Amino acid sequence: MNRDNLAFLQIILNNLDVIFFIFLVFLGFTSGTIAEKSHYRSIKKREENLMHIPVVNSGDFIDNSKEIENVYFISGSCVVALDYFKMVFAAIKQIFGGRIQSYETLIDRGRREAILRLKEKAASKNVDVIINLRIETSSIGQNAGQKGGIGSVEVFAYATAITYKK
Amino acid sequence: MILTNIPMVPGMKIVEHYGLVTGSTVRAKHIGKDIMASLKNIIGGELKGYTELLNEARKEALERMIKQAEKLGANAVINVRFSTSSIAQGAAELYVYGTAVKVE
């Protein structure tokens, strides 16, 4: 091995932490983007499939002309986390302020996924209408409660489902 | 046991109120799941381990509330509400409350 190669190796060894950081950001960016795209595709497809079940967040959306057969309590939840790239990007963005789009898409995915899971449960019970949907979001994970830290977000959706007598 | 999160049970009449029933559970994360979750945090996306854990915990809280309602002689719980709070690093409290009633 010549001296140039040795010097190069030396630089790499000295900056191992920086290289590791760049690697993590790169890994987060590529895998995070791929995962997000495929998740959105599946969300859109499933949302279309479950469009036939009406969901309302008001509690008195009941058709009084029909007799009620069953009442169910249904829920769905999802925990989503930021990837490394988004975390770094958001930390930089927090210096200047403004919209942090990476957080927006993350929470949007979580909410839609939670509602979809609720609707999937409802679909398996053949319900006619879902009323009084409530969504709750809470921050969990190691850096929950710390300044500027959204480690992971849990979205929980719950509702009352009704089936009418046919 | 009928559960609803509206102040009534559709299609039925409330004949008796028994007051507030509650259920809660405090759960800590399991270290294996925590390590997996922190690895998953690099890639991002859903943390299935946590979703499962919280679902389980919530089920337990609900069961506790239902048990309390059954003890009172109720056959339904109306106006069910959930609340989640992070009480310590790595532990969360899941709390559920509602009104126990008898319906016909």
Image (cartoon, coloured by chain):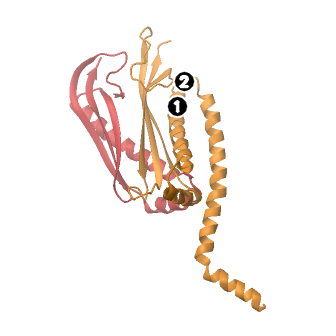
Chain colours: A orange, B red
The numbered dot on residue A46 is none
Specify the amino acid type for callout 2: Ile
Q: Position of residue B101 (x, y in %)?
A: 26, 25
Q: Is residue A52 left or right of residue A143?
A: right
Sequence-wise, which precedes: disc 1 or disc 2? 2
Kindly give the residue lying farthest to the top in the view shown: A65
Above or below B53: residue A142: below
Quadrant of image for the N terminus of chain B: top left
Q: Residue at (44%, 13%) from the top-left corner?
A: A63
Q: Which residue is mark 2?
A: A53
Label 2 secondary element? loop
Q: Are marks 1 and 2 in contact (CB under 8 Å)?
A: yes
- Chain at tag 1: A
Specify the quadrant of the image occupied by residue A20.
Answer: bottom right
Q: Position of residue A50 (x, y in %)?
A: 59, 28
Specify the amino acid type for callout 1: Lys
Q: Which residue is mark 1?
A: A119
- Chain at tag 2: A
Specify the quadrant of the image occupied by residue A57.
Answer: top left
Quadrant of image for the C terminus of chain B: top left
